[in-house]
Amino acid sequence: MVVVEIVVVVVVVVVVVVVVVVVVVVVVVVVVVVVVVVVVVVVVVVVVVVVVVVVVD
């Protein structure tokens, strides 16, 4: 029975590690997407401001 308990503990630990890794990867992907969106928005705003200033001037 000790072997079965050891196997169960190992399986639980592996599952927990896999879940943690997946959560970390998802968080990293979300952060990267947010950063990319913010950069794109900033670039678009800067381009629009420059175009407006050039056209108005």
Image: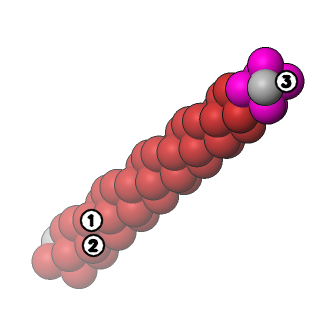
Judge from the rendering whether residue 31 lies leftward or rightward of residue 47; answer left or right: right
Q: Residue at x 20, y 75 (%)?
A: 52
Q: Nearer the viewer, mark 1 or mark 3?
A: 3
SS category of the residue bearing label 3: helix
- Image quarter hosting the N terminus: top right
Q: Which mark is residue 54?
A: none
Residue that numbered label 2 is attached to: 48
Q: Residue at x 27, y 73 (%)?
A: 48
Q: Is residue 33 visible?
A: yes
Structural distance between the alpha carbons of marks 2 and 1: 5 Å
SS category of the residue bearing label 1: helix
Of labels 1 and 3, earlier in sequence is 3
Structural distance between the alpha carbons of marks 2 and 3: 67 Å
Q: Which mark is residue 45?
A: 1
Q: Residue at x 52, y 45 (%)?
A: 23
Q: Amino acid at mark 1?
A: Val
